[in-house]
Amino acid sequence: MSLMKFEHRWVEAVYDGMFPAKADVRIPLGARDADMVGLFEDARGAVPARVALGLRIAVWLVALSPLFTIGKLVTIGGLAGADRERVLLALLSSPLYFVRQLTMLLKAFGALFFLSAPGVREAIVQAPKKALVKLGMKKESNHERSVA
Amino acid sequence: MSDQSPSGVQKKSFPDEALPEGSVVEGRQLTADVDETFDYVVVGTGAAGAVAAYTLQNAGFSVAMVEEGAWVKTRDFTDDVFGSFKRMLRDAGTQAIEGRSFIPLLQGRCVGGSTLVNSAIAWRMPEDVVDDWTDRFGLGSVMAKSEITAHFDALEEDLNVRSVDDAVMGHNNDGFLEASKSLGIESHKMRRYDKGCVGSGRCLQGCPSAAKQGMSVSYVPWALAKGARIFTSCKVVRVMMEGPRAVGILAQTTTRTPHAVRVRARLGVLVAASAIQTPGILRRSGVRAKALGQHFQAHPGIGLGGVMERPVTMDFGATQGAESIHYRKTDRIKFETISMPPELLAARMPGAGAALMHRLAEYPNVAVWGVQVRAEARGTVGTGWGGRDKVNLTLTENDVRNARKGLVLLAKLMFEQGAKEVWPGVHGLPTVMTSPDDIKKIEEASLDPRAYSFIATHLFGTARMGVDPNENVVGLDFAVHGTDGLYVVDSSVFPTNLGVNPQHTIMMLSRLAATRIAQGRRAQRVA
């Protein structure tokens, strides 16, 4: 079953906190530039039902956790970027195993989605590839030639 | 003539193309039930199944292979990690071992099985394991060293086993060798099934140049070329039995409206569906051995990441190219390099938000080395909710202690190699360590397995081999005790784990089993 609209907004907020744009000049893109909700729903459809349920529970857990992690009575969507990051860091280092695991599950899937967005992977790995081409250690692709 | 694809790889014909007409029956395209007969049916096309099928077909028998997954062709491989996982891994890579902690479990589910998504590491079975199986489990008649050696020799010739070429080592692998040499830890380049690796760093997503000799570009097409057939996207429901005799398999296509696929076997059925799926197939076929699904073992592993002063560029070079068994006998651990794509590495990077983005931007300088534990723990594989395979294993304190020692040593190696920061990835410790002085904190880390992020890939023992039917599932002739013509030829039969990568031993035992089955049948014919 697809997530509700408010859950979609939570997904966006969680991943915006996890992968914010312009946090590093070398990666100008952030989760907002990727279709994280679409990819999230696609993934939920591709995994077994209990993993899909786990992903949904994880979204609820993170969305409703600001009160317990940073003492603010709002959902993750109501927080600014820095506070979202604080919430996520608190959950990832929680003393409760299932809390850590569910947050890690979201992070792992988020990384798969975010890095698959156009331009993101290239921003991270293209520079060394070019260096290797120059050294003759890697073939230059047609795409890379045309971009150059 | 230069004809290049967008990835820069010159277009050429791959071994998984131009297969004999009619040799592949794709279950998803069937419009009616199927009923066919062969001499032997082989369930599974991974390291064990593909080798067994080829060996039997080559010996003059007619063979059908039945594979639950689809055939993902070399030309269709992409570097999109999740897309690859969806197409090639069971449950899109979300399977997990349950116990005190969850351990992700990666298994291929496609033609070629896990050989499509592993790093093609070839390790001959260690002599101490041969001796152990002979002495403790009475497998001396299976473990004749001269016979084992002959099978390994043949496999290595077929699959071109060789050390990683210097040109494609890459800095992640070279760095490990340099660091271990500095600290006096014996290490070396890996030997792999390799016919021209170009260092694309994409072993985990499927080799785009078919240099990696996975089963879908080697033994499966070779078996088809000799007349075998393969039924893909067909999940085996059960082995059809007539009394104690295996007479074929009943499968269903993996489509919304499944068709029945009956593949009858005149002479026998060989199950090679992995240590996780084989017990379920045998159970559904009426096998009631007490040891079925018991004695499950694995090699859980953990990766250690670090940011180096110099570029590492893990996207170039052999995905896994260097290793060490220096501590295998003393501490049951083995070190391996593993170049991870950023999609997978990001989950292991410390932090979230801005800190995570800064680390992602450092990807070109990140190295990842791992420790694999020859775990003492034994678990079970049973049937869970909805008929799914349920895998249970809790690591012992000793297993975790060994893993922790491995992390300590890897952290030392990383700093030796000039790491600016190291990520231990252990709950309760700082997420980032910036000085060798911090390493003592790892030495004092918790021994609770929930504090660590293990992953499991090597799986053994759930239909183990042995003389006594009360304690084992399979006899020394690879036949399930109390049955006729029902064989198991995958790592389910291993009485213990190995402490080295098992694909080579799996293929060796499968080849040995199929050779003996063929010889036995020929002898019967002559008689």
Image (cartoon, helix red, strand yellow):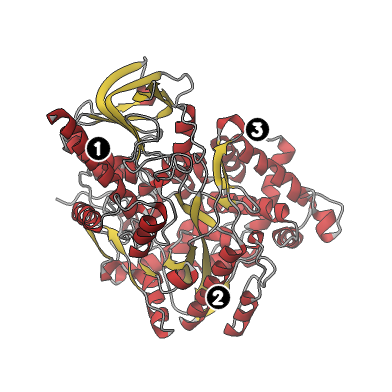
Frontmost residue, A130 versus A99: A99
Q: Quadrant of residue B243?
A: top left
Q: Give the vertical position of B258 relative to A128 (above or below).
A: above
The amino acid beneath tag 1 is Ile
Which of discs 2 and 3 lies nearer the camera? The answer is 2
Q: Earlier in the sequence, mark 2 or mark 1?
A: 2
> Residue A93: x percent and y percent?
71, 62
Q: Neighbour class for label 1 at 10 Å: few (<14), some, many (≥20)?
A: many
- The residue shown at (59%, 57%) is B395
The answer to whether tags 2 and 1 share a subunit is yes
Which residue matches tag 2?
A: B408
Do the dots labelled 2 and 3 sit on one chain? no
Residue A23 visible here: no
Q: Nearer the viewer, mark 2 or mark 1?
A: 1
Vertical side of B94 occupied by B346: above or below: below
The residue carrying mark 1 is B517
Residue type at the position of mark 3:
Ser
Q: Is residue B499 left or right of residue B9?
A: right
Secondary element under disc 1, as helix, strand or loop, is helix
Question: Is the residue under label 3 in contact with that under label 1 (CB below 8 Å)?
Answer: no
The amino acid sitting under disc 2 is Val
Element under disc 3: loop
**What residue is at 52 percent from the left and 69 percent from the top?**
B305
Q: Is residue B8 left or right of residue A30?
A: left
Name the subunit of mark 1.
Answer: B
For marks 2 and 1, give the CA distance. Answer: 47 Å
Q: Which quadrant holds residue B437?
A: bottom right
| Residue holding disc 3 | A2
Residue A47 position, x and y percent, is 56, 38
Residue A139's disc is none
